[in-house]
Image (spheres, helix red, strand yellow):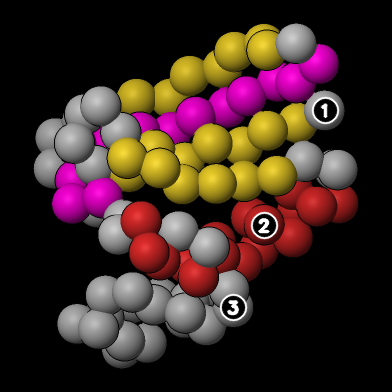
Amino acid sequence: YAKTCIVISVASELDKILITVEDDGLGVDPALGDKIFEPFYRPDEGRDRIQGGAGLGLAIVKRVMQWHQGSCSVTRSTLGGAKFTLSFP
């Protein structure tokens, strides 16, 4: 969903390792922040299985993070789009 820019970074914070992926796209509506990690949810009603995506990608990310006792979240990026954060203990 990025327009022209994607930034990936890794940082250490207290007892966590944070991996962030940010872009300059449209971003994610804050009201959908938790919902987009649910299986089969697609916030973009213009997309369907024929056009690509089953709504499982972020649900799989969330499950993998749980297996590693971590978490994932999405906020607004300073680039204007979305900022996905993976937090590992």
Horizontal and vertical percent for residue 8?
43, 25
Horizontal and vertical percent for residue 56?
55, 73
User: In the image shown, does 45 or 53 lie closer to the viewer?
Assistant: 45
**Nearer-N-terminus badge (1/2):** 2
Q: In which quarter of the image is residue 63?
A: bottom right
Disc 1 on helix, strand or loop?
A: loop
At x 18% / y 51%, what residue is drawn?
26
Label the magenta part by its dominant secondary structure: strand
Determine which of the numbered discs, if any, sits on residue 71 in the image: none
User: In the image shown, does 32 or 39 lie closer to the viewer?
Assistant: 32
Highlighted magenta segment, given as a residue range: 15-27
Query: Mark 3: few, some, or many residues within 10 Å (few <14, many ≥20)?
Result: some
Q: Is residue 14 left or right of residue 48?
A: right
Per the image, is 33 magenta?
A: no
Residue of label 1: 89
**Nearer-N-terminus badge (2/3):** 3
Query: Mark 2: few, some, or many residues within 10 Å (few <14, many ≥20)?
Result: some
Disc 3 on helix, strand or loop?
A: loop
Q: In which quarter of the image is residue 69?
A: top right
Disc 2 on helix, strand or loop?
A: helix
C-alpha span from label 2 to label 3: 10 Å
Determine which of the numbered discs, if any, sits on residue 62 in the image: 2
At x 55% / y 46%, what residue is drawn?
73
**Can see residue 45?**
yes
Name the residue type under label 1. Answer: Pro
C-alpha span from label 1 to label 2: 15 Å
Q: Is residue 66 left or right of residue 87?
A: right
Horizontal and vertical percent for residue 70?
77, 41
Determine which of the numbered discs, if any, sits on residue 39 in the image: 3
C-alpha span from label 3 to label 1: 24 Å
At x 75% / y 31%, what residue is drawn?
88
**Nearer-N-terminus badge (3/1):** 3
